Amino acid sequence: MRRDIQNQNYWTQRGLIQTVRSEQQAQEGLLRIKAIYEQSLFNVQQEISNYYVKYSKQTGLAVDELTHILSGSEKADFLIKMQKRLKKLGFNYKDIYNPNYVNQISRLTAIRQQLYWEIMQLAPVEGEIAKQTFMRVAQTSYISTLQDLGVNITFGYASTKVAKEMLKKPFYNKLFSEYLWGHIDQFATRLQTTLGGALSMGQSYQKTIRQVQDQFGVAKRDSARVVLTESSFFYNQAKLQAYKEQGVEKYRYMATLDSRTSKICKKLNGKIFNLSEAEAGINYPPMHPYCRSYPEPIISASIDGRIRRRVAEYESGEKNT
């Protein structure tokens, strides 16, 4: 039996179900991202431990030794580590570290550089996980929305094409990949500054590790905020695409109402807008980080009839092929 797509209660129920599913898919991606941050934190803590063991003496950290220029063997070891890390990022280390610079580099600077590139390795891995997550969210949203409209479609070329097009759309005037590299660069810079300051002051190992752990915690929370918000963006953009394809002309803004609902979403809740004027952050979700709002299509009798005819024509054509 065909769904009553003109019924608002039907769309409210479907909207809630789809929104929860989208959030679950985003959380699955976040679990994978969390794992790479934890592995990176472990690697950084191991390196810091090695620095403290190597440059400590009975009276504490030998700060003066950290100011020495790298020796021949230290320089060779540094270049091997840099070559390995930069290769993973698609860079040629010779383009970044010329011989004259390396000949003047101190132990402390070398430590900070190693830490920086260790953190930067997060970017491509996190980016790939996020891309897979956004693709999955967009595909599922697009297919589910069409199916809710009564249009049968399965995971295939059409949904994959739509999802890939979604990834090309910037959110808040910036592509996710651009944001990610900037975010990781800032995180890596802050961390190397923290470690450099800690070592140059002879700070205790325990305090340094706490500071590093705190900064990793902040970086993970920042990443979670962006991934969840971007997932909401792709989820709602895929719905928008499906609505446009089926001739939907208006939508109702629907907020998830509870203690966490923002003032702006409460204000927009229930308001009706033209689909042609939908703009994320203006009158279409997401309106803000962690936004859980979604659009609900307004289906008139004429649009319902048009969709029915399209489906009937498609199914008739399928039977005759």
Image: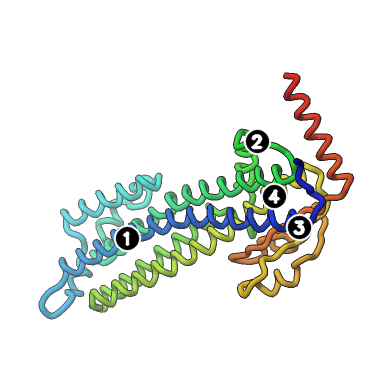
Q: CA distance from mark 1 to mark 4?
A: 44 Å
Give the amino acid at mark 2: Ala
Residue 100: x %, y % from top left: 29, 54
Q: Earlier in the sequence, mark 3 or mark 4?
A: 3
Q: Are the residues at dot 3 and dot 2 in contact (C-beta closer than 8 Å)?
A: no
Give the amino acid at mark 3: Asn
> In the image, which disc is placed on residue 239?
4
Mark 1: few, some, or many residues within 10 Å (few <14, many ≥20)? some
Give the amino acid at mark 4: Lys
Between 143 and 190, the residue placed more toward the observer is: 143
Q: Is residue 112 left or right of residue 133?
A: left
Q: Is residue 31 left or right of residue 236?
A: left
The residue furthest bottom is 59
Q: Quadrant of the C terminus?
A: top right
Judging by the rendered image, the residue that carries numbered circle 1 is 113
Q: Earlier in the sequence, mark 1 or mark 4?
A: 1
Mark 2: few, some, or many residues within 10 Å (few <14, many ≥20)? few
Residue 73: x %, y % from top left: 16, 54
Judging by the rendered image, the residue that carries numbered circle 3 is 9
Residue 127: x %, y % from top left: 48, 51
